[in-house]
Amino acid sequence: MISHSARMLTGGSSRMATPTTRKKQLGYALRYLREQAGLNQVDAGAHIRKPGNRMAEVENGQRNLAHGDLILLLQLYGVTDDERITTLTQLREGTSQRKRWTGYRAVYPEQFRMFVDLEEDADLIRMVEAEVIPGLLQCESYVRALYADRPMHEGAFTMGALVESRLARQKIFTKPDAPQLMVVMSESSLRRWQGGPEVMREQVDHLVAMSKWSNVQLQVLPFRTPTDKGDCVGYRFTLLRVPSPGISGPLELVYIDQVIDTRYLEDKPAVAAHDTLWHQLSAAALSPEDSRAFIRDVASDL
């Protein structure tokens, strides 16, 4: 039987969260407790003889925290509940990344690895895509077409590793606690060819099949949508919600990936702004049922 603390650590399942997520959850909880105690990061850092910027890194999930320092901080924040102390201690113990990014997983760029882990542990994923099929919805032939023109220099990753790394992310849909995926994608994502017509026909058929899954909501924003009602061009982002232990609530953040800029936004105003934008685009897009029919029409054009 799973203990109450274990359920909080795993978001209600028996699977342990990834090291990245556990580190983020711990930092999120510590920030919440510090703010509830009316203290700033400088105060907290001074208590464990660390600078304030070190505390910022801990709370952002970018740095590990020694067990002794965790206990000191919990004492400072007035945390006396044994179960909460145990939960946070267990979170700290599961943050090692040793040998995690080896094999095909080494394909993931350094700045993308946090996203892969958070994606794996999220219970809700909402995304907006403008030009390509979202990675979680790509079929194998489409993935191969995406990478076909990339030069495979000596020492670089093989096509097999690149494909495996992409398809491995999709395994989140087959786990018992599979997340809810909600996607708004522009018509250009469907019209922009990767490979030949056979590849695109297979890809759109794959989209139709996935759109029927109970935990997948797929919406298309057609070219004919008036720009004042929502224009997907220029907007590409993902909203992630990850269950977290305790009373601090779920971890929510925005991931933005552009050519020269990868960002993780966690402050509440930024998350709220993107949440509003996602709802506006979802309202402007076709309904899931109409989107499925639209995708079928695209398939017939191929």
Image (cartoon, rainbow, N blue to C red):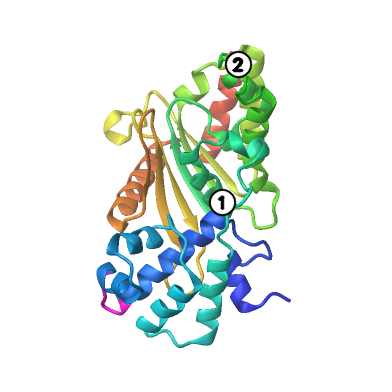
Mark 1 crowdedness (10 Å alpha carbons): few <14, some 14-19, many ≥20 = some
Q: Indicate which disc residue 38 carries.
A: none
Measure how far apart labels 2 and 1 are at the Cα level.
31 Å
Count of numbered marks: 2
Q: Amino acid at mark 2?
A: Ala
Seen at 36% across and 54% down, the residue is: 266
Note whether 48 is above or below 184 in the view shown: below
In this figure, which residue is indicated by the disc labeled 2? Answer: 148
Q: Nearer the viewer, residue 236 or 44?
A: 44
Q: Amino acid at mark 1?
A: Gln
Q: Position of residue 33 (x, y in %)?
A: 37, 75
In this figure, which residue is indicated by the disc labeled 1? Answer: 180
Which image quarter is the N terminus in? bottom right
Q: Position of residue 284 (x, y in %)?
A: 37, 38
Q: Position of residue 77 (x, y in %)?
A: 36, 81
User: What is the magenta range?
Assistant: 36-40
Q: Is residue 123 visible?
A: no
User: Disc 2 on helix, strand or loop?
Assistant: loop
Q: Specify whether residue 37 is painted magenta.
A: yes
